[in-house]
Amino acid sequence: MDTKYDTGIITQTQKLRGPDRGVWLSLLLVFPLVFAQPLPVEPQAIPDIDWPAVEKEAGELLSQVVRIDTSNPPGNETAAAQFWQNILTQEGIEAQVYESEPGRGIVYGRLRGNGQKKALILLHHLDVVPADPAEWAFDPFGGAIKDGYVHGRGAIDCKGVSVVQFLAMALLKRSGLRFERDIIFLGTGDEEVGGRKGAGWFVDKHFDVIADAEFLLTEGGGIRQREGKRSYRVSVAEKAPCWIELKATGPAGHGSSPVPETAVTRLVRALEKIRRYETPFKVVPAVQAYFNALAQHQDEETAQRYRALEQALKDEAFRKKFTATPSHNALVRNTISLTVLNGSPKTNVVPASASAQLDCRLLPGEDPQTFLAQLKQLVDDPHIEFSTLLNFPAVASDPDTPLFAAIRSVAAHRDPHAPVIPSVLGGFTDTHYFREKGIISYGFSGLALTAEDARGVHGLNERIPLAALRDAVQVLFEVILSIDAIPEGANAHGH
Ligand SMILES: [Zn+2]
């Protein structure tokens, strides 16, 4: 499909429009079937988009959204949901605000296509992680626009994404172009602490509102810029959290006359066993696909290893090197992090109970019950009780769809040498709520970020370049227009 763009169509459109129509030329290249047959297209059918104006609009919108403080906890997303409802309504797009509980808003908007195909959801979250103004160069909730950046908490995660999604949708409406799918704008709350009062609640209570959706795009992937090289990362799967609490019990007493077996000694022994435990390696199909894509840009030896990863991991030297990169290690096994510890609040008191929490992450397809049973067996202590604090199934989305093809084709003409990589996130987003319902969900925002930009996410001085916002709007707009322009149904678009 990609090679299509290297053939006749480019020459024809160049002749037709001239290279000075750069933006629309590029748009034409993305969905050749729409405009390529029959050529020439009536030029007036193609609206002119003023991209510098889009950039300005994006910056101003983001600045306004950043100023609505939705730090979670407590979230208070209703103000942001209402903000978007107003903006959507002004644009002539129907919109509604839901609340999972007072103050915990969710915004839903729908732009209607001609109903030929199922809807596409553009999902983002309205809440942000907290920020301490004392540690920032700019007020994290000031929305300053300076030196080509919008500064503030959420500039990237996820308010920047919301602005990109809104503008792609608005441009579609303003352009008057025909399209088949409804586009749903969905901004949920509570994502940063698991989404139970946001996406989880909405999918549980109001799934009927979005039941006609087939595809979903959200954060978790985009265009990665490292050392001048770009790659398109589309997350198709995530590891699933399996957060576990261990509670040990034993005789309470005074610290001055110790006994050998107490809640604390039992807990420490259990945790030491878990710390030493090496979870087995397993290369699931989504992870193998990811390393297949990476292999194309490695030296021959590494490429061979990547293409047969499970086999390669049996080699000790390779395994050592590979697992030394924590993000790689996390993709080929279930992981366990010891995080929370609770014992006695007083130095001289032996507590009757002590507890610890483990942040475990399971590969797609793993059974949490089996995993838990293995840990219990390993610890092998009747004085320790296990409970699950958070868990959901890890479901992967098929990368072989018209939506993925659309991302590929947009990438192919914008960045002919950039690989498009289906990836597996070590962390998790709200996508699992939708994947569990059978909606094909990809993490792809369209934002191109450098390592330095990305550092601000959940960190200090989060900011986003205005140019990245503008380009992402263009990418997402092109992706939406390309979904149905590629395979079947080309005639339905004919002008
Ligand atoms: Zn986020």
Image (tube, helix red, strand yellow):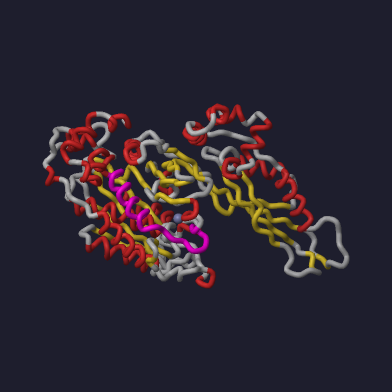
Residue 316, quarter of the rendered image: top right
- Does residue 489 appear in the picture of this structure? no
Q: Residue furthest bottom?
A: 134
Asked if residue 166 can be seen in this view, the reply is: yes
Residue located farthest toward the right when viewing the structure as drawn: 257
Identify the residue at horizontal 55%, vertical 52% (top origin).
Answer: 390
**Residue found at x 43% / y 48%:** 431
Q: Which one is in front, 437 or 38? A: 38
Q: Position of residue 93 (x, y in %)?
A: 23, 57
In the rendered image, residue 352 lying in the magenta stretch gets the answer: no
Quadrant housing the C terminus = top left
- Quadrant for ligand 1 reads bottom left
Residue 45: image quadrant is top left
Left or right of 101? Residue 55 is: left
Magenta residue span: 456-480
Classify the position of the N terminus by image quarter: top left
Q: Position of residue 127 (x, y in %)?
A: 43, 62
- Compared to residue 89, the image places residue 233 above or below, namely above
Query: From the viewer's perspective, is 489 left or right of 166?
Result: left
- Residue 201 coordinates in the image, percent (x, y): 42, 56
Tell me if 416 is positioned left or right of 181 in this view. Answer: right
Residue 450 percent location from the top left of the image: 46, 51
Query: Residue at position x 53%, y 34% from top?
Result: 284
* Residue 241 sits above or below residue 348 on the image: above
Total number of numbered discs in the rendering: 0
The residue positioned 70% from the left and 46% from the top of the image is 274
Is 472 included in the stretch rendered in magenta?
A: yes
Q: In this orientation, which residue lies closer to the viewer: 464 or 492? A: 464
Q: Which secondary structure dominates the residues rendered in magenta?
A: helix
